[in-house]
Every structure is written in C-alpha cells, then in structure tokens.
C-alpha cells in the first residue's frame, strides 16, 4: 500500500521546484502518494525559506503544531534553505524531527527517510547532473532548473550560504528535460536560477562553456514548445545582446522580473549589487524601447541599514520613471551570516514601515493609471486554471492575469482575447 506524503512549501519558485523534485523522488522510487491531510500523512516535509526572518521564527512553532497533529508513526523532515542554515540545531531544538536536508541536497531524500537523525546540509554538493524523475506534467507549464546556487555576495542575502556557489546545469540535460515535457501537454517553461542570465559561466565539467542567450536560442528551437519564461535575470548581466534576444525571440514571453532592490547608487554599492541607478533605469528603458508592450516587475527592499531619506527618494524616483507592473516590496530584515547584519542601522523601524507604505501606495497609483488603458486591447493568453464552472484563468505573454467566461473547456489553449474590463491585479476578457 502507498504511503502518504504531506509537503508544505515556503518561499520562492526555486523552492517550489525543489518540492516537485522531492515529490518526484518519493512517488516514483518510494511509492508515496501526496495528501493534503496532515493527520493521515506518513511523512510530513516542510520545505523552508530563510530569505526573511519571519518564516524562520515561525518554523519551530509550526513544527510543534505538526508534532501534535501527526499520526504517532509519521516522520517529519525539514528541507530547504532554513535546513541548510540551521542544520542539526533543528533536531536539537525539536528532537521529534526525523531528518534535515539542505536546499542543495534534494536528491538525497530517498536516503534521508531511512535514517533517523539524518542531517545533510552540504552547500558544495553538486546536483547539476542528477536527473530527477518527471512526475508527469499536470499542467501546461513546467519549471526547469538551469543553474543552482549563486555566485554573488549581496550583503543582505543569505542565499549563497544556503544554496552555495553557482553551477549551471549542462545544456543537453535542460533541452532533454524540456523535450520530454513538451511530449506531454507542456507548452510553456519557466527557466529557474538565482541569476538566470549568468547561465553558462561555470559547469561541473570545466571544459563546457555556454551563455544564457545561446541557451534561449536552443530552447526556442524545440518545435512543440510555445512559450519561454525565466526568473530571475540579474540587472548586472542585462547586456544589449540579452535585451535583443528578449525582444526578437518570439517564444520568449514579454514580461521580465528585474530586481532593483534600491534606487540609490550608494545603497546599491553598500548592498554589493554591482550596478548603478542609471544602469538599471537605462536597461528598463532599452527593454521598453525594444518591446513597448513588455511588462517589468521588480523587488524593492526599504530600510536597508544605510538608507537615508535622500536614498529612499532615489528609489521613489526609479519607481516613478519605470512605473513597474508588479513590485515585491520588503522591509529589510537582518539575516544571519550576512555582511549587512553587522551594519549599524540608521533607519528606525517606524521609518522603514512608512517607506514601505509609500512604495505600496505609489505602485497602486501607477496600476490604477495603467490597468484601464488595457480595455479594448488584444492579447494572447494561455489558459491554465478553471476557477469556477465556466470561468477560466490564464496569463498573457506579457504576464497579465486574464479571466474569461467559456462554456467550452479551454484549459491548455492559447487564444486571442479582447480585454473588456480591468481590476488592479487582473483583467477580464472575451475570447475572440
Ligand atoms: S544575486 Fe544577491 S540577492 Fe540574489 S541570490 Fe545572489 S546574493 Fe542573494
């Protein structure tokens, strides 16, 4: 009889992909099936995130609750970035946890479940040539890892300590994974890496060399593949060749996430981001010039320890100039083993909160100005979710969430629609 796996995933798309890989390993090799009911699970896995402080501090209270709810025979595993960062301390603090597996050690899950007290958080482990089983695409999109780790050292970021240095996955393996996926019903891929456009700098086999643009060109030659997305490119590596490929390759969806973090060149330097305000604004302007209907999203951190009011005004200036289509905004929170943690902060918490509110308010004002302009426009949408009986949800190539009514099942279709109504975060449309 199958055993049941309950898995909870926190954090980013990389973590979601790691969870998919964990599920694939356990279902195909260990005969687990997934369940949404924690109480009848035989194995409970929390795939953690440590980029912000809150989920980490919640982990132990969450584990306590799980321990009370679970069957007496059920195992508990902690995986992901917090597992990498806290390691064996998790079992010391919560002895009922059976194993701890770091973000770079996912392929060892089939070993971890058989050893009580198993801890492996090796951030130098190289999984780039490990072929995870495909659990069978249950949708029209597939996440594809193209690299692991990060070769940057942003002063606020814990990721290089939890996911190790950057290594690219060989191109042949990526192309093979996508070719297999499109043989089922997948039509869109999301290429994942901490800095996707740094792809090809380092491989396990030192002789291989490649580049992100080359990879995009080769992927787009896969005939049945219709759409390519990627997350996230680093502003520093956004050269003209990359922008040209983004603009001219028809399979590349025209929305792009460019993490700003701060609009102040001085703060960007303190963050060790490697680019200036002017470079960032210029890259966004070049993208908009090359693809006027493209949409740009970003990440912004307010309240970095050295951020003065003038620095924050620079961030507001960039927001006003770029008018982002989506902003993931965060109040700076110090993370262990980072340089910024030891920087004395000049930003009281109340000031950081107020700056966050100002970013949110300005972004909302921009959306209120931009969203109505879509009414009457035509867009091409991949429908991937049925919300209610006759309501379907999909995404346009430039990343708008679109809802349409249809009496026919349109899941998996790529259709032309005309926008009929707008909301702040999504659009309504009719199929043409
Ligand atoms: S590029 Fe910077 S922010 Fe992104 S994962 Fe690497 S160190 Fe963290």
Image (spheres, rainbow, N blue to C red):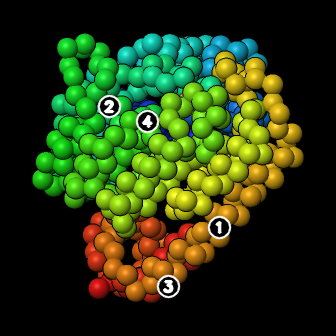
Q: Are marks 2 and 4 in contact (CB under 8 Å)?
A: no
Cα–Cα gap, marks 2 and 1: 34 Å
Mark 2: few/some/many CA within 10 Å (<14, 14-19, 20+)? many
Judge depth for marks 3 and 1 and give the one in front.
1
Cα–Cα gap, marks 3 and 2: 39 Å
| Image mark for residue 236 | 4
Q: Are marks 3 and 2 in contact (CB under 8 Å)?
A: no
| Residue 128 image position (x, y, % from top left) | 33, 23
The C terminus: image quadrant:
bottom left
Q: Earlier in the sequence, mark 3 or mark 4?
A: 4
- The image shows residue 174, relative to residue 259, as above or below, that is above
- Quadrant assignment, res 199: top left
Q: Are marks 3 and 4 in contact (CB under 8 Å)?
A: no
- Residue at disc 1, secondary structure: helix
The N terminus: image quadrant:
top left
Q: Pointer 3: what residue?
A: 421
Judge depth for marks 2 and 4 and give the one in front.
4
Does the residue tagged 4 have its C-beta within 8 Å of any atom of ligand 1? no
Closest to the observer, 397 or 270: 270
| Residue 96 image position (x, y, % from top left) | 70, 22
- Quadrant assignment, res 308: top right
Q: Pointer 1: what residue?
A: 364
Q: Pointer 2: what residue?
A: 199
Q: Earlier in the sequence, mark 3 or mark 1?
A: 1
Q: Is residue 153 left or right of residue 350?
A: left
- Residue at disc 4, secondary structure: helix
Tell me which residue sits at (21%, 22%) in the image. 209
């Amino acid at each position: 009889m199958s055993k049941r796996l309950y898995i909870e995933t926190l954090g980013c798309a990389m973590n979601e992909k790691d969870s998919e890989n964990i599920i694939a390993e356990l279902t195909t090799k260990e005969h687990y099936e997934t369940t949404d009911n924690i109480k009848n699970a035989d194995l409970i896995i929390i795939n953690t995130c440590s980029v912000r402080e809150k989920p980490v501090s919640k982990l132990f209270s969450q584990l306590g609750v799980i321990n009370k709810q679970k069957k007496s025979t059920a195992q508990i595993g902690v995986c992901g970035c917090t597992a990498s960062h806290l390691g064996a301390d998790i079992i010391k603090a919560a002895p009922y946890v059976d194993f701890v597996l770091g973000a770079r050690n996912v392929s060892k899950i089939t070993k971890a479940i058989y050893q009580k007290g198993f801890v492996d958080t090796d951030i130098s482990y190289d999984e780039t040539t490990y072929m995870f089983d495909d659990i069978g695409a249950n949708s029209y999109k597939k996440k594809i890892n193209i690299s692991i780790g990060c070769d940057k050292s942003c002063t606020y970021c814990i990721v290089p300590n939890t996911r190790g240095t950057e290594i690219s996955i060989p191109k042949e393996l990526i192309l093979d994974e996508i070719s297999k996926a499109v043989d089922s019903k997948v039509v869109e891929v999301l290429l994942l890496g901490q800095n996707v456009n740094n792809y090809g700098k380092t491989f396990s086999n030192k002789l291989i060399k490649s580049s992100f643009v080359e990879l995009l060109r080769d992927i787009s030659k896969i005939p049945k593949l219709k759409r390519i997305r990627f997350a996230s490119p680093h502003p520093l590596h956004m050269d003209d060749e990359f922008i040209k490929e983004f603009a001219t390759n028809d399979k590349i969806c025209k929305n792009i996430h460019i993490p700003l973090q701060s609009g102040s060149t001085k703060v960007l330097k303190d963050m060790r981001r490697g680019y200036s305000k002017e470079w960032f604004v210029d890259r966004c302007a070049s993208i908009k010039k090359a693809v006027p209907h493209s949409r740009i999203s970003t990440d912004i951190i307010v309240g970095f320890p050295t951020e003065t009011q003038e620095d924050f005004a620079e961030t507001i200036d960039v927001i006003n100039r770029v008018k982002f289509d989506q902003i993931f905004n965060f109040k700076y929170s110090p993370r262990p083993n980072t340089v910024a943690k030891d920087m004395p902060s000049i930003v009281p918490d109340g000031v950081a909160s107020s700056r966050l509110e100002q970013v949110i308010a300005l972004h909302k004002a921009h959306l209120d100005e931009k969203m109505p302009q879509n009414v009457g426009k035509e867009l091409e949408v991949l429908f991937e979710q049925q919300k209610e009986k006759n309501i379907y949800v999909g995404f346009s190539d430039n990343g708008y969430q679109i809802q349409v009514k249809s009496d026919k099942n349109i899941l998996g279709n790529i259709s032309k629609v005309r926008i009929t109504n707008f909301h702040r975060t999504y659009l309504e449309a009719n199929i043409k």
